[in-house]
Image (tube, rainbow, N blue to C red):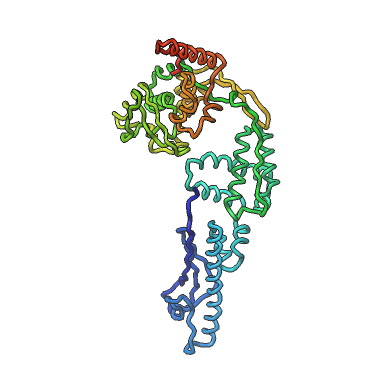
Amino acid sequence: MKKQRFPTLTLHFNLRSPGREEKPTPIYAVVRHEGRQHKFATGVKVAPRHWSRRWEVCLRSPMLSPLANENAAAANDVLRRVRSGVARCAEHLRETGGRLSREELRAVVLGHAAPDAAARAASKATDLLRRALRDYYATRPDSMRPNVTRLNSFLRFLNDEGVEDTVAVVCSQDTLDRFQRHLLASQKSTVYSNACVELVARLVKSDPRLRTGEPLAAKKVKAGVKRDDGKKRALTAGELRALRDVALENELENEVRDLFLCQCHTGQRIGDMPKLFEKNAKFTEIEDQIFIEIVTQKENIRADVLIDEEAKKIIDKYRAQGGFRKLKPGTWSSVSLATTVGRVLKDVARKAGLVAEESWVESVGGREVRKRAPLWSVISSHWARHTFVTNKLLEGVAPDDLCALTGHADDAMIRAVYGHLSLRDKAGRAVRQMRRNKAEKSGSGADAPDGQDCQ
């Protein structure tokens, strides 16, 4: 939900040298906008003794000379135009909910332009885009960093192509389409290209000063990559064992390794992991299993997080020592936490010897490209969630039951993305289920042994 903003605009007049009673001194218009003060010269003067501080006008009186009254009348006319300009600014801000720069304020307050014309003429389109980004993500700082990178990509394109820095040209459909073709020609991934184009269209829509009349259409390029060809997969039991047993001297690396392993055993998103380590997060026993109830950050729905023996050891360890000493995940945004964990985890995985070659498909420049890299260089915190869900599917847990454990609104994502089951995995699971059914019918009541557990 976008944060409410109530622009305030105040005006008063100051004399440059109020102590000189007889000598005319310049009158300044002092405007306060969004907590900042701006002082503009009105171009008129008045003797301090002929100035009313209470009413902020130049005095006229039969006691004054005709020239003094004539000068006072001329000055008051200018002050009235300034007041009218401030009133137009205030009305403009109420209608648009935007902001005006110092140059825009000067142009409107001194009567040089109308608010909407000043907003376009006094600022470059690139400056307005930067300001629109800050305003749009003011209440969503987690999303600011990646979108700064995307906007900078657009700004570099404008500069390299010599695009005229005006709203009419920069914020046009033609420029946006050219930018998209440039990204695809530069072999940028389809996901990144779509995200950049969507951001520009979103910013233009959010700020009235960037609109040119016809709304921009962010035309998505379809990736065409199957989910099974994606980069993420479930880690094997051997890979998890290597991570658990590797000797690490760096305390931050130890904490990141422990947090990731706990994530593999609980299946939560990295942004929700700090909730499991809070002192007031209570363990609840249900059917001989331990759970912690949380409300997920992304979808704001309840999840009963399964805490197995390995996860409880890690949680108890950090609760006993008063939390993480280096990582301090509870004080970071989810994006910052994911970025740091991903960076350090790659070093941990490299030291653990996770060098198996990974192969995946990306849509680059509008076409599918097969890429390869060692596991340690592509692993991220989200692999833990894939690992947990895949393991539970192998154990026979139904996808809709996994929703309660992972905090998914429905099982569509689990079925489409997180279940990396091979044909042999599926066949083995079917055989084990048939054995259970046969055992139940025979009255033995004993379940057949499960297959290999990746945990």
Q: Residue 378: percent from the left, percent from the top?
A: 53, 25
Residue in the image at 46% along x and 22% along y: 397
Q: Residue 59: percent from the left, percent from the top?
A: 48, 81
Residue in the image at 49% along x and 77% along y: 46
Q: Is residue 304 left or right of residue 74?
A: left
- Which quadrant of the figure has residue 333? top left
Residue 300 in view here: yes
- Count of residue discs: 0
Q: Is residue 283 left or right of residue 121?
A: left
Instruction: Return the residue nearer the eye: 124 or 438.
Output: 438
Q: Residue 287: percent from the left, percent from the top?
A: 35, 24
In the picture shown, does residue 150 fall above or below 24? above
In the picture shown, does residue 317 fall above or below 12? above
Instruction: Return the residue nearer the eye: 41 or 325.
Output: 325
Residue in the image at 56% along x and 58% along y: 96
Give the residue at the far left of this rendering: 320
Residue 349 in view here: no
Instruction: Return the residue nearer the eye: 137 or 348.
Output: 137
Q: Is residue 385 left or right of residue 206?
A: left
- Which quadrant of the figure has residue 148? top right
In the rendered image, which quarter contains the C terminus? top left
Instruction: Return the residue nearer the eye: 108 or 103.
Output: 108
Q: Residue 383: percent from the left, percent from the top?
A: 49, 25
Give the residue at the far bottom of this rendering: 62
